[in-house]
Amino acid sequence: MKNKRFNLLLIAVVTLVALWSLWPTWRDYSFSTQLNSFSSAQDSLKYAMDHREEIDDARKKSLKLGLDLKGGMHLVMEVDQVDLFEQKAWNKDGKFTTIMQNVRAKATQSDARILDLLSAEFRNENIPLSRYFYDIRNSNQEIVGKLDKESEEALTRAKEIIRNRIDQYGVAEPVITTQGSRKIIIELPGVSDENRVRNLLKGTAKLEFRLLREPEEMLRTLDRINTYLLQNTQNSAAVTAAPPVTDSTAAASASLPVSGISSVAPASLPPGTTAPPAVGKQPSSKPLYDVISVSQYGTAYTAAHSREYVLSLLHRSDIQALLPQDSEMLLAAKPDEGNGGEKLYSIYLVRKAPELTGGVITEAKATFGSQSVQPEVMMAMNSEGTSKWARITGANIGKRIAIVLDGSVYSAPVVQSKIPNGSSVINGIGSLEEAKDLEIVLKAGALPAPVRIIEERTVGPSLGADYIRAGMLSLVWSFGAVSVFMLVYYKKAGIAADIALVLNILIVLSVLAGFNASLSLPGIAGIVLTIGMAVDANVLIYERIREELAEGKSVITAVTQGYDRAFSSILDSHVTTLSAAFLLYTYGIGPIQGFAVTLMIGTSASLFTAIVVTREIFNLLLAKNLMSDKSFG
């Protein structure tokens, strides 16, 4: 009697919990239907604003649809391990650069591990790895082991950072898995702004604070590069092919007001300064200054149409050799608008070694400037960063510090006083949306190495709607066919099986909704298979009961012995299926895992409904004398 009460209570609790878990999904569907029913967008917006909290809460807790049903993006990203190993190396020289270039070239043509390619290249050159990596006392095998650990940690860290960025972006139930030693597979359901997501995921978020060289040093460096290009006929001819700067007046840098740091006044060319002459057919006498203009304040800039050429020029090893020691030329992240509306990019000569990096940033927040309507990102530092920032700003009053993110200068303000509280601001940002994305990548942290997208697929919402329709049809047809079969073949006992089947599906969907998992096409396939398994368990029990009835036993005895004797077979089949589903989930990826999850939930629910639910239904019917030996067909 106690066991019966417990079973009834268990069934009631499971049913109520399943309905409670699916209630937000029903509310979300109701709100969506209501919003679509309004004839005007204004009425729909008003309704949405009036019920905003309810709608958001229901949407957050509702059953999510996977990429194949809702539409979205599928990305395969690759961690640049060549760049990672270059960062770990020391004592770099021309030979090391050549080796890494060969490794990079081979990596683009092979799926082999980067570390294997690196080791092979060093063996071919008969150079020990210790010449560039770790301690010279380490053997090649020890260094390979350390680099292998570094690459594994970089892949894991990149995956977690990407997950943090996506979570803060607001994508519901993303699927992020690793494949091999350098690939990350990402599925983002419901994403519509593909370009924004690409930029968000690819950005390394390597934030650095670097000191600028003096303006006189900048002018001397540009003159040295111009003389070199002039002496090199081939380079000079190549430069003359680039479009000239046509606007001679522009702001040299984006302003960045910070407590204790003042923005740099627009360094326009002073009156009387002429713009660079147009390029003629003859080699120019000042090849560099045909694409770069300089003000008397030592501020250099280039036009937007010359930007790519100038970047390629500054990345050349022979040009970099002409720069002062421990120096690098970088371009502004955003252009300024010169007279005539032309876009001009400022050029900065900065120290290579950063004074401070973004690892000390603990908080970032997108907002609008207090003295302007331009978006900016305010940053706070940890205790270590605060003390270093105070020392750096205190020692460089009157000098400019460039805030560099992923190799581009966002601003280069003048330090006016010591900053003791660890605050800093990034501005020169185009839109609030861009500022929010920058906030996300700074909060999530910098990637250990650059990542690039090597494969991308977009699933449109219309295609997802077709998949939903096809999936629901398959689910309805399978459920209908099985239900009708059970009613026709097993008569009254078939009703109990159909009730258990409905509860089975409710349990699967409620568990998915309760754990914020997503339902995909493979998941629907798992539910369909679960329907078959649930019925299979009932068939085993019913056939066993029929055998007992055929031997002349009473209905009560036949039901009791039918369940007892079929239990071992049912348990074996369900445990076997659970084991297979667990292995699929453990070693599978993406769609296979979605199938395995629903199969595991459905198999567990099937065991519960077949053994507990249908038996209690029979006990209830037997207690009211509503069953006979003909109730099983």
Image: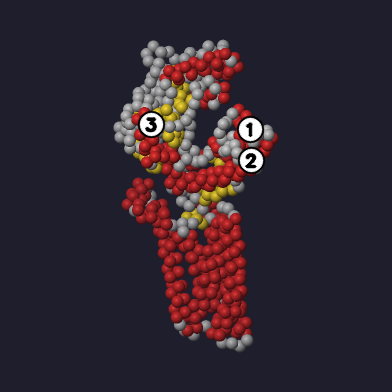
Please name the residue that numbered disc 2 is placed on. 140
- Residue 487: x percent and y percent? 56, 74
In the drawing, what numbered circle is on residue 342? none
Q: Is residue 37 above or below residue 198?
A: below
- Residue 104: x percent and y percent? 62, 35
Q: Judging from the image, what secondary structure is the residue with disc 2 in? A: helix
- Residue 80: x percent and y percent? 56, 39
On the question of residue 137 being in view, the answer is yes
Q: In this orientation, which residue lies closer to the viewer: 514 or 236?
A: 236
- Residue 583: x percent and y percent? 60, 60
Q: Tell me the crowding category of disc 2: few under 14, some 14 to 19, or many 20 or more residues within 10 angstroms, Cα based.
A: some
Please name the residue that numbered disc 1 is placed on. 99
Disc 1/disc 3 C-alpha distance (Å): 37 Å
Q: Between tags 2 and 3, which lies in front? A: 2
| Relative to 240, 53 lies left or right | left
Tell me the quarter of the picture where residue 430 sits.
top left
Q: Residue at x 43, y 34 (%)?
A: 356
Please name the residue that numbered disc 3 is placed on. 392
Q: Residue at x 45, y 26 (%)?
A: 350
| Three-letter code for the amino acid on which mark 3 is drawn | Ile
**Proximity of marks 2 and 3: CB atoms separated by less than 8 Å:** no
Tell me the quarter of the picture where residue 473 sits.
bottom right
